Amino acid sequence: MNFHSIRAFIIKTFNIKEGADKEATKEGILRDIEFRGINAWILIASIIIASIGLNTNAVALIIGAMLISPLMGPILGIGYAVATYDLATLTKSLKNLGIAVAISLITSTIYFLLSPISEIQSELLARTRPTLLDVLVAFFGGIAGIIAGSRKEKSNVIPGVAIATALMPPLCTAGFGLASGNIQFFLSAFYLFFINSVFISLATWFIVKFLEFPVVKVIDSITTKKVHRYIAIFSIITMTPSIIIGYGVIKESAFKVRAEQFINNELPRDEIQIIEKRLTYDKDSSQIEIFATGKVISNEDKLRLRRRMNSYNLKRTRLLIHQTGANGDELTGKISDAIKVGILDEIIRHGEIERKKQVALIDSLSKRIEESRQYNAAFNNISKEVSLLMPHLLKYGQAIAIRTDLSTQINDTIIQVTLVWNNRTPISSRKEERERLRQWLQIRVQNQKFEIIDMN
């Protein structure tokens, strides 16, 4: 196979000019620019679906919303207009993109204001840290979209592009930021939407220029160079924050990997039980914070662990170890015994009573009152550990409670925990600490049902 045949094969394989329908592509782009009537209502419906998906962590709903969203129209119109020097189409595209963004933000903000679910879900958090990877996805997604749109034979590429570039979720997340008063959420999510829009438009401009679409207005070479320079400068300015954020994300990820290796390799896991670990990354001073029970680590061992951190490239990292029981193993053992005697024995005994149905409702309640007094001894020790697990908590209550199914008269024993939070505690922090408490209680009282109630 000679050079010419190889060259011919490569040109044939990667030729996108063949089969391009320039007139139909132009008509399609111009048709999808406007947001009025059906397009406006489809956009509202897709925004609500995406907002519900983000609010409930339902990925399928988010994908469905992206598939029906008409947001791509004016963004492609901007890229096409700049490439063909069509000022009228550029003005129209920018105007309609602004209308679409306004509709999206208003709709999503109203939804999140009315939604009873106020917790920040992982799907919302995922849209608040745009990186260079998002720039690449937007650009190459735009490349795929405009190439597929320019073909005479249409394919299923466009739905895939809508999912990959993910224009809808960032706008909905920005609406969540407005509804919750979280300006950082709003700015981060809106920046993600902005870079997606810019680089989809840039990809459209690139392919339209490459396919040599006819220009609306002929301009001289000097003006053309100026346009290209402005596009390059604007693109660089747009992607610069994402590069900085992306670098920080990579550094944080590397820190967490090294910290996990240090914890797994250096801490005496056979002697202590780690309840919770908090890895906090900061470019100047990171921190590893560990909450544990079991054998108390001596000051000499802590110094040795801090010296060992250098081997894991954790030189600027603080190590904080919190352990229950200032008196060491003896107190830790007493806490364990109190929990075992004061809770597990009671749970087993209550379970036997309930399963055999040997005690009537009134007698059972009377016994639980007496047993709850015995339970208080164990509770005093438990509350000391809770203060380590939940720093934002003001008050903690715990009691054995009985629930009766009135139709069957079957009793059910639960441990009812009540929490009173510091009023300044964010919702996200409450959720994390409540989850830590649930995991800890499962270790302390196995096979027991819990009910955790927020009192404020």
Image (cartoon, rainbow, N blue to C red):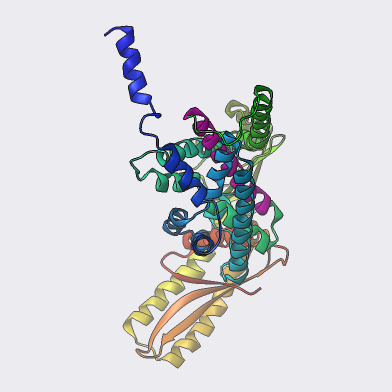
- Nearest the viewer among 189 and 260 is 189
- Pinpoint residue 447: horizontal percent, then vertical percent: 41, 66
> Which residue is at 37% across, 81% downward?
354
Q: Which residues are magenta?
A: 185-211
Residue 273 among those drawn in magenta: no
Is any atom of residue 12 visible in this view? yes
- Pinpoint residue 339: horizontal percent, then vertical percent: 52, 65
Along the horizontal axis of the image, is 176 left or right of 76?
right
Residue 187 among those drawn in magenta: yes
Name the residue at the top extreme: 2
- Pinpoint residue 414: horizontal percent, then vertical percent: 47, 75
172 shown above or below 191:
below
Is any atom of residue 118 visible in this view? no
Instruction: Point out the image quarter for the C terminus.
Output: bottom right
- Nearest the viewer among 405 and 189 is 189
Q: What is the chief secondary structure element of the magenta stretch?
A: helix
450 shown above or below 263:
below
Along the horizontal axis of the image, is 442 left or right of 98?
left
Instruction: Point out the image quarter for the N terminus.
Output: top left
Along the horizontal axis of the image, is 316 left or right of 35?
right
> Which residue is at 44% across, 73% downward?
347
- Nearest the viewer among 392 and 153 is 153
* Image quarter of residue 59: bottom left
309 shown above or below 59:
above
- Pinpoint residue 429: horizontal percent, then vertical percent: 63, 58
- Nearest the viewer among 43 and 85 is 85
* Image quarter of residue 2: top left
